[in-house]
């Protein structure tokens, strides 16, 4: 008998007289009929409570608002699949740096950039959570975690009210990043410190018609 087989045999023996687990009740809400305007209002309320900057705009206004939010940046990294039009009004003095498979930025290079712009996959209004799943318009996890300022573009059509509604839109084997406000912790003496585990500043553009 191999070591693996012996370990598994001992586990089976230890569990042989274990009681059958009771079926877990699943009576929680799995869907919601909340109208779009109420979803937007709820998500905005949660994001503001988390100290994120929020704007509700239409798709034609994206370049204008991206430029306004990033006007003080020196450089901006973006995933290779991001819509280039969204960056078209950035001042010429801001360096735009794509991150793509085969040409990925190092952690040091990401740390040296001022900001990152990504889109998102789905957002949960009730918890104020934005989820990125590594699609080309969102990029790998590192680019949304290392730069100090994250500007996230959220299609209004991707907002749901409840967690179960979000889960059915996700492939759980993908590299998911769940964002509920800027990075912050109160672990040390209950003093809030921002930017410890990710961006210190989070700006969100909720976009109609996208």
Image: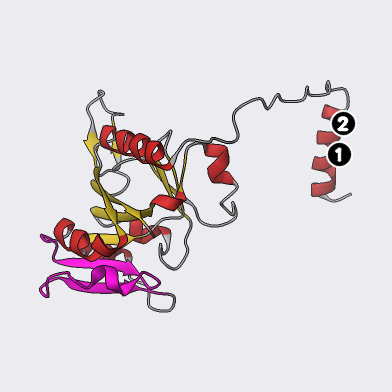
Residue 75 belongs to magenta span: yes
What residue is at 38 percent from the left and 73 percent from the top? 80
Q: Is residue 78 above or below residue 171?
A: below
Which residue carries the number 2 mark?
Answer: 13
Which residue carries the number 1 mark?
Answer: 9
Task: Place residue 113 in its image quadrant.
Answer: bottom left
Q: Which residues are magenta?
A: 71-100
Q: Is residue 89 above or below residue 141?
A: below
State left or right for residue 23 relative to residue 201: right
Q: Nearer the viewer, residue 178 or 196?
A: 178
Q: In the image, residue 38 lies at what x, y percent?
A: 39, 36
Q: Is residue 154 above or below residue 196?
A: below
Q: Is residue 99 visible?
A: yes
Q: Nearer the viewer, residue 81 or 42?
A: 42
Task: Place residue 13 in its image quadrant.
Answer: top right
What residue is at 60 percent from the left and 55 percent from the top? 173
Which secondary structure lies at badge 2? helix
> Cβ–Cβ below 8 Å for labels 1 and 2?
yes
Picture quarter with the C terminus: bottom left
Q: Nearer the viewer, residue 78 or 20?
A: 78
Residue 7 belongs to magenta span: no
Q: Nearer the viewer, residue 125 or 183?
A: 125
Q: In the image, residue 131 lies at what x, y percent?
A: 44, 49
């Amino acid at each position: 008998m191999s070591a693996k087989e012996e370990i598994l045999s001992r586990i089976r023996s230890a569990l042989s007289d274990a009681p059958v687990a009771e079926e877990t009740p699943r009576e929680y809400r799995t869907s919601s009929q909340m109208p779009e305007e109420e979803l937007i209002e709820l998500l905005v309320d949660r994001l503001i409570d988390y100290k994120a900057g929020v704007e509700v705009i239409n798709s034609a206004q994206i370049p204008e608002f991206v430029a306004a939010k990033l006007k003080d940046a020196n450089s901006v990294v973006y995933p290779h699949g991001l819509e280039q039009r969204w960056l078209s009004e950035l001042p010429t003095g801001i360096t735009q740096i794509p991150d793509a498979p085969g040409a990925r930025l190092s952690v040091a290079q990401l740390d040296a950039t001022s900001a990152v712009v990504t889109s998102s996959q789905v957002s949960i209004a009730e918890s104020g959570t934005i989820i990125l799943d590594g699609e080309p318009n969102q990029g790998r996890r590192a680019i949304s975690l290392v730069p100090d300022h994250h500007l996230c573009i959220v299609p209004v059509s991707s907002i749901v009210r409840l967690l179960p509604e979000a889960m059915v839109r996700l492939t759980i084997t993908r590299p998911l990043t769940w964002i509920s406000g800027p990075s912050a912790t109160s672990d040390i003496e209950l003093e809030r410190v921002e930017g410890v585990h990710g961006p210190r500043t989070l700006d969100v553009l909720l976009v109609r018609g996208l």
